[in-house]
Image (spheres, rainbow, N blue to C red):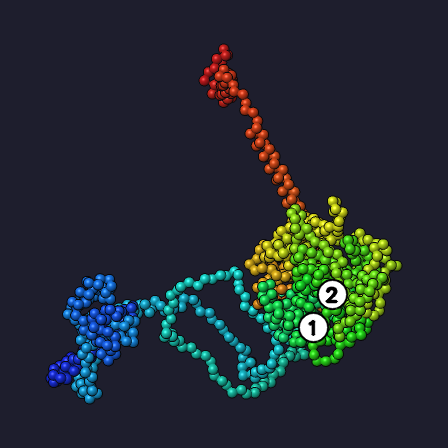
Amino acid sequence: MSTKESSRSGSRASRSSSRTSKSKDKKTGSAKGRKAKHSGDSASKKPEDSAASTSSGHPEYIVPLVLTSKTQEIFSCRVDEDVTQENPFKLLKKEEILSDVKSRAAVSDFSPFKSVITEYPGEELLLVFDRDFTYGQNFYLVVTEEAKELILQPPEPVTDEEEQTEDSEDFTYVPPVPRPWISLGSELEVEEEMVTESRTKIKFLISRRRGEFGSQVTFSDYNASNVKDGYMECAPYQDKRFNLKPKERDAGVQVVPLLQERSTQTKWTYPRNACTQYTPREFTAEQKQEYLSSKSLKEFLNSVTLRLGLALQQNDIVNPFVDDWQALCEQERTFGGKADSHLKEYQSFTDHQYGKEKSISCVSWHPALHGLVAVSLTERLSLEDRVNLSSKLILEPSLILIWNLNDPIRPQLMLECPDDIYCFQFCPSDPNIIAGGCINGQVVLWDISAYYELLSAKTGVTKTTASKTALEPKQSTELPMVRFCAVSSIEHGHREVITDIHWLPDYFEISRTGYPYENKSGYCVQLVTCSPDCSVMFWDIRSHKTNIQTPTSRKQEQNQREVPLGVPDTFKHLDLVWRPLLKTSIPKIETGGEFSPIKISLREEHHPCRTADKLQSGVREEKPEGGINYSTLRAASAKNTKVLEDVNTAYFAGTEDGELLYTNWKMEKDGDTGRLISAKPSQRHGVHDGLVHTVQRSPLLQDFVLTVGGWNFAIWKEGVTSRPILQSCCTEKRYTAAHWSLSRPSVFFIGKEDGNVDVWDLLEKTHEPSQTQNVSAAAITCIKPCIVSAKQHFLSVADDGGTLHVLEIPWTLHHPSANESSAVLHYLDREVSHLEYYEQRKTVRAAEKRALELKDHRKKTEAAPPLRSKEHLEEEMGRENAAYLALEHAVLMGLGIKKENGDGSVKT
């Protein structure tokens, strides 16, 4: 205890003793009043303390209980008759209560409190009527004599004058007496919790040249974007190498800081101008003549003449100021340096009016107008929610937005869709034609040739031979919306969502049986779609009408000519009557049923610019200078065209079960019925643990295919039928999109569900991505690169939140090295060799295993050797013993231990 505490306790003790001595001299009435007051205070404090200590919510000196009407009649304590709110007290005799408990047993309301009543020292117990249910019941029983007396006879209130008189008479100030302080170990605990400095302090010396003291400082604005590396963005990311789990620790903080004294030079002198006059020291004429004619100078010049001449010759031959390290590498001629290998966000697009709470399902760059990118918006709803909200979704338009990189706020064009579009693609030969696949299985066509001038003017691209139609857009501030020209027949199309669409090249077309023929028109007129409804369909945008017209066909043609206002009539011959030219499926190999394709990859789709080498120049039709009239184009007859044997009709397909198939779209004849049926796939591999959402051939190495699905990816080579040549391990986050690089054969990009983009470079790392960069907080849905110029490459990344991010690809990721193609091809061919060696060793191991099994089987089936007699065994043991003794004799003789005498005996 401290000195102050002991002094306080002493003053309180002296004060209480003075009060006690003075209270004896007062009158009896005042003494009784004060006694009653003190007893009342103690009694009031006691219930409060007990109430705080008990867990049941009532003081310890009462027992709440419920009295039934029968019990109230027995003890004459009926509510509002015997006991009221004004007179709630009732004295009950202890003997009557115990007799009631004895006679009525468990039925008695006092039975649970029999032990408390028995231990009560008095003869009468106080029963109090609790009208407000303060303690939870209608009555409570007082079980102590002190509380009963205090309740029945409360103390008289003391007036203010008596209190003031009592306080003035009782209080006497006693000064505190200091006492020595006794340590109980608290200062040791404080010292243990104090933080002591254990590390050596680091010293910094900040200096400045004396000539800069007092100089004027001029501040100016500085734009960090004007200079490379002017600023650096430190985006937060989760470091996978560290996973620290916080543990409980004991830490102390000293509230009194340690004071230290430090000083610094702050003296300021008044600046003033100063100058100094000086003259150079020069030799006199006599000294100059003496030094120039001295012997030592001549000897020095003769000794260094040869070395000086050699140094001058070397300076003329080799420039000493050239940086050799910089000369070893190629010169940088791009926007960013080679050291900058990260993707930089160039622009982002979000439409808050039409793209709110929607996802981007597909992205496509305009093939002719650089800087234009189109995105399709879809609802983020499940099938059940889409069915429940079908009436509301009809009122909301489904759109494809075309954005310009120079205008991130307002889209340039909107394409109206009959339903949500999940895939679309520009026509390679005529970029004004766009084909898309709906969620309801229909194929849609748009014609934006009327808006070509509007789009080219904003991108800065002009074209004198731009195709035009009679429908010119009106110049207005409103956002133009283009309605679709034609939509396929819903009865003859896909039954589920179209997940992939591709245009066939312009140098061939297929017949109804799947065989490729020459395309004399030189335009892309056919496209292929796939859907999870187990079908792959080929479509032809040309008219297939015959010259003979019936009344029914004339009526249908008249109805088709009535085109809505503002809609181009480019494909009016296809609207609502468009049927697939060829419908194929992918039957299963061993069992019945068909596969459900999600993505397909054609070998010929990466060559849209083949011209004269594929066709005969004499039979190729000339392209018109103006626009293309697709209604006048007719499919060529199979009799007048030549089958192209060098066109590969095989394709890869990825299914929703994570399988990769290699099949052919040519129809085959059934040997039993003679009908044309779809060919079965020649290869089937299941390496992915989720639906395959990417199947893409390398644009620079045609034989290699990238497939991504679930949590891993794989690289295949066409012709290798055993397994993929490269397969990644499973990642923590699911892959959602991927695409090859258009300029580097070893680089490809993969998007994940956490919004990160992995950049893989096979020449740098094959077990992990070269770099991982966060692009969005939502899942990545689509990735498409684009080459704007030789110095500028873009990567469009769409996310599930409806935002399109356009990233600028750095120099290191789009500029290939001198021998990169051959290096990548050598690496992939080496992996193919390893795979072939593995298959050979697998065959050899299987043969060895079969040989061992056959040998074991022969041992088990061989007959047991015949049993030999006892005489034969004794004879064989005798021969072995004789041979052993002869060998022992020869060894001992050779060692000189035994010698043979002349008579033939042996001497040891």
Q: Residue at x 64, y 53 (%)?
A: 659
Q: What is the quadrant of the C terminus in the image?
A: top left
Alpha carbon of mark 2 to alpha carbon of mark 1: how far?
22 Å
Amino acid on which disc 1 is placed: Met
Amino acid on which disc 2 is placed: Leu
Depth check: give the residue in front, 269 or 828.
828
Q: Earlier in the sequence, mark 2 or mark 1?
A: 1
Q: Residue at x 24, y 69 (%)?
A: 70
Q: Residue at x 71, y 51 (%)?
A: 663
Q: Which residue is mark 2?
A: 576
Q: Is residue 388 left or right of residue 906?
A: right
Vertical side of 840 occupied by 327: above or below: below
Q: Position of residue 328 (x, y in %)?
A: 68, 62
Is residue 657 in sight in this rendering? Answer: yes
Q: Position of residue 75 (x, y in %)?
A: 20, 71
Q: Is residue 343 left or right of residue 455?
A: left
